Structure formats: C-alpha cells, structure tokens
Amino acid sequence: MEYTILILLLPFLSFLVLGLAGMKMSNRLAGTIGTVVLGIVAVASYYTAFDYFAAGRGADGTFPTLMPYNAVWLPISESLHIDMGILLDPISVMMLVVISTVSLMVHIYSFGYMKGERGFQRYYAFLSLFTMSMLGLVVATNIFQMYLFWELVGVSSYLLIGFYYTKKEAIAASKKAFIVTRFADLGFLVGILFYGYYAGTFTFTPQLQMLASAGAMIPLALGLMFIGGAGKSAMFPLHIWLPDAMEGPTPVSALIHAATMVVAGVYLVARMFPLFIGYAPEVLHWVAYVGAFTAFYAASVACVQSDIKRVLAFSTISQIGFMMVGLGVCTSADPHDGGLGYMAGMFHLFTHAMFKALLFLGAGCIIHAVHSNEMSAMGGLRKYMPVTHITFLIACLAISGIPPFSGFFSKDEILTACFAFSPVMGWVMSFIAAMTAFYMFRLYYGIFWGRENKELHARHVPHEAPLSMTVPLIFLALVTCGAGFIPFGEFISSNGQSYTIHLDSQVAITSVCIAVVAIAVATWMYLRERQPVADQLAKTFKGLHRAAYHRFYIDDIYQFVTHKVIFACVSTPIAWFDRHVVDQFMNFLAWCTNASSEEIRSWQSGNVQQYTRVFLGGVLVLVLVLLLI
Amino acid sequence: MRPELSLIAVILLLFFFDLFAKGKARDYFQPLACVLMAVHVLVNVVPSREAFSLFGSMYQYVPMMSIVKTVMAIGTLVVILQASNWLVGDDTRHKQGEFYVLLLSTLLGMNFMISAGNFLMFFIALELASVPMACLVAFDKYKHHSAEAGAKYILSALFSSGLMLYGISMLYGTTGTLYFDDMAARLSGTPLQVMALVFFFSGLGFKISLVPFHLWTADAYQGAPTTVTGYLSVVSKGAAAFTLMVILMKVFAPMVAEWQTVLFWLIIASITIGNLFAIRQQNMKRFLAFSSISQAGYVMLGVIGGNAMGMTSLVFYLLVYLAANLAAFGIVNVIERNSGKLDMDDYNGLYRTNPKLAFLMTLALFSLAGIPPFAGFFSKFFIFMAAFSEGFHLLVVIALLNTIISLYYYLRVVKAMYINPSDAPIATFRSDGYTRLSLVLCMAGVLLLGIASSVYDGIHLFSFGL
C-alpha cells in the first residue's frame, strides 16, 4: 500500500505550489488545483479503505496494523527514537475517509463561498496545509509524529481563523485559538516525554514489562496527554477558543468543527485506548466525566445564543463531549462487555463529521444569502432557499437522533454504553440529547420559520446559493441519510473483533421519545411569528438567561485571571525587574568592557623595546606561577 | 615527504621561470604560480595512511600532519590568488618571483616544522618560516609602514627565537638529547625544565600571537601588504598552532599539568585581551589582527584537552578559520587596492555601492563570530566540546562569554556596511577574476564545511598516532 504516501504528499505539494506561486495564478486556476488535488486524495483514501478492509481479517480475527512506511527520523537511544511513517489500522483508515470527504466538500463549496475574496489563492494553500496536517496526524506511527502534525494543525488553524487578517476580531480569535490549544499542548508534550521515558518508546505498542514497572507514571502520562486532547477538542474549561474561531470563513469552520481539529482529541484518546483501558481505566472515566459536563454546559449555552454559527459551535462542543463520554465509559476492551463505547464514540465521530459539515455549510449558504450571522436577520427563509432548507432539516433530524438518519444510530450506541456504565450517566446523557434536539430545532425554526425580518428581506431578497455550494450540501445530506446503516462494528470495535450492532430497543425507544418531545416543545415555542412562551421564559429566568447568553462568564473569568491576576501581579513586576535590574546589569557589563578596553590601550604603544619588556615579563611571570603554585 | 618534495619542485620551477622568462612570457607568472600551487594541493590531498620517520627520526610523519599541510597549502593558494591584483602594480611587478619564492619558502619551513622529530630540525624549520616572512612583511619596502612593520617583526622574532633557543639548550642540558622520541622519557618536571618549557612555549606563542607575546601583531599586520597579513594570520598561525600541539603532546607529555596551566592562562588572556583591543580599532587590518589574536585563543582550546577530539577539532577549526579569515582579508585587500581605503568608517554604506562584497563580508564575519549555520559555529562548537569533555568547564564558559564581545565588534563592521549612512561611500567597482575565485573558494568553505558533516568525520578518521 505504498501509494498511501500520496495522501500526505499531494496536499503538501499543493500547499507549496499555491503558497509560492499562487499569487501569479488566477483564482480559478488556484482553486482548481487545490480541489483536484484533494479529489485525488479523497479517491486515494477511499481506495485505501477499500484495499485495507477488503484484505480481510488476520488469523486472530482482527484487521492487521500496517506500516507501509516507517523510517527512524531522530534516534535518541537504542530503543527510543522518533519515527516518521504511515500507520494503517481501522481507525486511521476511517479517519482518512472522513477527513478527505469533508475537506473535498469544503474545497468545492469554497469556490462559491469565497468567490471574489482577496487572498483566494492563499485560502486554498492554507486549506491544503490544514488537510495535510490532519491526515498526517491520523496516520502517525508514533505519538511524537502525532504531536508534530498536531502542532501543524494548530498553526494552520491559526492561519485560517485569522484569514481576514484586517479584521480585529479575526486576529483576536486566531490568537486565542492558538494560545489556548498551545497551552493545553504543553500538557500533551509533558505527557509524551513521561511516556517516552517510562514506557521506553514513542510507539503505541510499548513493551509490557516496561509498562508494568512504570506503575503510576503511565496513568499520569495519559492524563497529561488528555489535557492536550481536551484543548484541541474544546473540552471544558479549555473550550473558549472554539466559539470565537467562527471569525474564520464559514467553510473553514465546517472543516475545523466537523472533521479536523476538534476530533483530534477524540482520536488521540481512541489511539491510546488500549493503554487507557489496560493501565489507566480511572483516567478514562475522568475523560467521560469531563465529556459529560462539557456536553451539558455547551448544550445549555447553545439554547440561548442568537448567532447561528455560535449555536453550531456550542453544539459541536456538546457533541464532542458525547464522543468523549462514549470512549470514557468503556470498562473493558470487549465490545460485548463494557467496551461498546469505543465503537459508539468512533461511530458518532464519523456520522457527526458528515452532518456537522452539512450544518456549517448550510449556515454558510444562509449567511451568504442574508449577510448576517444573527437570527434576527433571518426567519421564513424556507421560501427563498429550498435546497438549503431541506438539507439543513435532515442534518437537524440527524443530530437530534431521529431514525433513520445517521445520528440516531451512533447516539443510540453511546447511550446504550452509558446505561451499561451507570444509569445516572445514561439518564444525564439522554437529557443532554433532549437539549440537543431542542436547541437544534430552535435554530431551525428561527432560521426558516418564525419571525421573518421582512424589512430586511424586502431590501435584499435572499436567494438560493450557487450550484458549487448546494452540491456539497446534497451530497452530505445523502451521506447523512445513509451512514447510519453502515455496519460500523464490522470495521471498528474496541478489541478489533467483528461486532454486530444491535439496537437496544429500550434505549432506542426512550431516546426517540425524548427527542420527539424536545422537538415538539421547540415547535410549540418557536414555529410561529409570535413566541410568547419563549419570551416569557426568558423574562422569568432573566438571570439564568443572561448568564447562559454570556456563556456563564467563563471567558470573563479567563480575562480576569490573565489580565488582572497574571499580567498585573506577576508580569508587570517581572517586566520592571527585567528593565531596571537585568538590563542595567548588562549595560554595566558593557560599560566595564569598554572601560577596561580603554585602560589597556597604552600597552600597544608601537615601541618595540616595550614589546620585548612585556614579552619577557610574561615569560617570567609564567615561570614563577608554575614554580610557586 | 611528498608535500615537501612537491613544494620544493614548485619553488624551483617558479625560481627558474623568474630567471629565464623574459618579456611577454612574464605575464604568465601568476597563472603559472596558481596552477602549480593547485597541482601541489591536488597531489597531497589524499594522505598516505602509514606513519613513518626518516633521517634517523629527524623527520616524522603521521597522516594528520599531511592533512594540516594540505590545509596550509590551500590557504597559500588562496593568498596567491588574492595577491595577484597587488603584485601587478608598478612597485611590485618586477619582483613577483621574489614574492612567490619567499612565500613558498616559509610554507616549506612550516611543513618541515610540522614534521620535525628533533629540536634542531624544528628550530631550523622555524627560522626558515620566520626569516623570509620578515622580507614579505617589508615587501613594499619603499612604504614607510611596510618597512617599519618588517623591522618590528624581525626584532621581535629574533628576541623570541633567542629565548626559545635558550629553552631548547636547557632541555638538552637536562636530558642529553634533542630527539622528541627520547626526550619525553627523560623529562621529570624539574624547575629548570619548567623554565625551559615556558621559554620554548614563548617561541611558538610568538608565532601564534598569544598574549603576552602578541604585541608585534597589530603593527606588523597593519604595515604588511594585506595579502601577507592574511597569510600571517592564517597559514603561519595555523602551522605553529598544530606544531605546538604535536610537541606538547609528544615531548612534554610528562609535564602535562604544567603546560595545561600555561595554556589555561594564556587562552583566557588571549581571548579576552584580543577582544578588548578589537573593540576600539578603526583600521580594518588592525581590527582583524586583534580578532586573530582572540581566535588564536580559541584554537588553543583544541590543544589543551590533548585528546583525539581536540586534535580533530583543532584542524577543523583551522580549516574553517582559514576560509572565513581569508575571505575577510581578501575583501579588505580588494577594497584597499581599488579605493585605497582601510578604515571602518570608510566602509559606511558599502552595501549600497558594492552589495555583493558587503554580503560576502557579512557571511565571513558571521562565521568568525560563530553564528549558525555558518561553518564557524560548528568549529567553535567542536572545539568547545573538546575542551569541555576534558573538564575545562570554567575555561569554556569564559570563552563562551567572550564570543559575546566578539559578536559586538564583528557586527560593528556589518553595521557600518549596512546601516551607517555615508556621504561618500566607496565607489562601485568590479573586482578581478583571481579575487573572485578566491572568494568563491572561501565562501564554499564558510557555507559548506559546517553543514557537510563528512568533513569533520573525515578529519577525525586521521586523528591518531601522536
């Protein structure tokens, strides 16, 4: 499977070509290059998946782990070295398919969305880089290679979020995303170093006796790595960058939220899953608790936001929380006995990538049509944009967990796994699922039904998006309709053995009922022009509403801690010390050097007799030093 | 004996050419000299791997010596290339032959000095390297500066030779032999021998221009023709440094504590005082003179460890230093020939009129200062590692601190060329082909020697046998 190297090389080449020569090309040519390359990558990824899964299972009933390439890049010691290569196993192959599909859709979609923008070529160059980084991350053969591409993902997301670099908010958002995730990556790096030291390797399959002798250090290393994963996957309280990352172009938001950056943390946990389950199950459960809290927090914030991209952003955070919960509630590697969550989490990652990309791209069409992110500028759009309306509705049904759309199947598996873990967790997650259905339909009605902003629409009639934008929507909608029927457990399960998904009728019925009730409530509250219930509720729980609207003031807490505490109490005195003590000391040293240089000038008199005197004097002093000491 | 024999052949060929060539044929003097030197380098570039001795151990050979001799020959070739635009001048045109013969004689002396196995042989070779050098320094004898420099050089050289001879006689008196191989066993570190060590040391310290034997350096460097200065600062210094290491490791092995103490203090003094003087120089040649004193201190770091890594790093340092320093001197020379200007202030705004030269000068100075990724960084790194691995931690720290000072004065020149404004910058000129070739050679060294790790590894293969 040597051709897999193309999957990494092609986007990188396209980045180089577009980055270096892009300004000399026309927009159309640059976009075509980027899209065609991504198309080839997508085909190569599909072919890889076909090739890999068609080759069948090995003697032990699992799909083999292949490494078409693996070269030692930086040897540190005999056993410890950093490699660069490509690793193929069920989850990495699945991720290749997800990433290249979504990225291809985004590439096509951007043709219409970014039409006429300044820096069109730069945009496509960065898209290529971003895709390449993410692909490199998932096929990493060892944790260090993963870390390198992980940071590349961070850099390219910084470049894309700050794409409109003349806009102040975009710059702030890109910095925020970079700094917050980078801060979390510190934990990741320390975790990797611990891991390398105690497990004696950077690969994912350390020797068992090393692990046994490492004792409590392996859980610590894994916990630290999860901090990095929590940063990238926007887990509470490191989620603050994600809503702001909406400042980038909307297709980029789709890419970041659906398939690339945010699932990196989930992928990391899945990648380290054998170690988590074997040596640190308690850390894994903490992952579940963090995921559950994040899911609840984000869902409650999403219920009151008025910016449609923000609602989607918080829904992403919430859904990532679901995936983390799925992985975290595993108690063994056997899918029949407590290991179902692994498959469920990865399945949800897959389905979510498709319908979340659909939602974001749909939101892009809407923003494109009304030139605003605010729900107040929308309402009643179903008349103007039928394709967007239908596809958006499909995505909303999927995320709410209504059969037969894909989200139902994956979410149902997660809930089953949660109920198996503990009934409390099961009910909590079911409740969050209900909230999901509620806020998604609040959003849906707010955009397509409800109170229409007639004044605005009369001035500028909203129109359906061009074909290059609707085609990806339709494609993704079809995938969303069909993806649930993929026998996912045949490909991916916690111990690699084949696992047949069977719906737990009790859980399925409960979750569907809950979702239907939540949708009904949302319909009752938001379908019509006048929304007395919603307004009344907002008035009654004024404090809570405002707190939720301001995201429970988490950003303000960060602001306070960084500016008022760290900057004022720590940085300012240090800056003073640096300027007045350190710098002055350096100036003093420079002055000393200069002064002594001035002092010894007379030695160089130009007088040969004096030279000989110094010469002889030096010799005699040396002799005396040697003899007397 | 291959290097010596081929060098003698080159000298004789040039000598007879000088005698018999008449009229138009003399125009080919320079190409001939360059080609012969290049042939000499090529003949000797692959060292023979067997160690041997000749003439009853008067002449000794280990492969590393051959490498050093080749490095010196390359340096001389570059100097000859750079000398061309000076030698064709009216004052010197008729005595080109003298220049080549004198220059190559000193090189021959250095070759013998490196391979000497006996103190008499060593002394004769040293004088062969010194006396023609005085003639070279005073080559522009009608110029006041050059004549004065020659006089200062020969007086100082005489004094140091006398002192060294005194030291050698004491060694002979206490051990009864002049052969290197026999002497080591008979040294025991008596006070008289300690004194002899220091006296002997001062003789080579003079050639390497270590503080406090360095005072002639600035005057001689400033007064001598610029190409000769380049030769003095690189080839002469390098040969002496390697010889010093050979003799210290071989002959004075029983007194290792003593000579390490001497080196310890001389290194600190040379690096620091060289730097302190370099800070306030205005004349480019004086500036490079003091910088070369400080560089000599760094070279000695390779000697003080006295191990195989020290030897490799010393030779590597010499090679890298040769490339960077000769590039700097070549540029100073070509600017002096074309505009007559030598002061640092004259270099103001050079970037605007001669951007390529300014850029090459910057690269050379960066390499001298040890800024990565230029070769100078790697050579400094290796030589620091060599001293550090032998436990001279304090010394390495002091040397490192001094690199900061050196950075300041090297960057002064860069600042002058790029930032300082000037009303009358040096006019744009086109340098001659020989100089260009020499600069290309030097820049290849500055850019490639460090990055191509095979060079260091290749030298390291031969660092045995002392």
Image (cartoon, coloured by chain):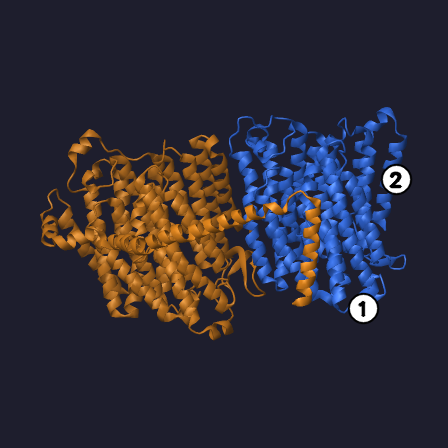
Disc 1 sits on a residue from what chain?
Answer: B
Residue B200 visible to an observer of this rendering: yes
Q: Residue at x 81, y 40 (%)?
A: B102
Tell whether A349 sits left or right of A546. right
Q: Is residue A70 above or below residue B42?
A: below
Q: Which residue is mark 1?
A: B186
Q: Which residue is mark 2?
A: B12
- Element on which disc 2 rests: helix
- Percent of width and height locating residue B414: 55, 38
Mark 2 or 1, nearer chain start: 2
Q: CA distance from mark 2 to mark 1?
A: 41 Å
Residue placed most toward the observer, B185 or B188? B188
Question: Which chain did the renderer colour blue?
Answer: B
Residue type, mark 1 in image: Arg
Question: Which chain did the renderer colour orange?
Answer: A
Q: Quadrant of residue B288?
A: top right
- Name, please, the residue furthest toward the top: B24
Tell whether A50 sits left or right of A172. right
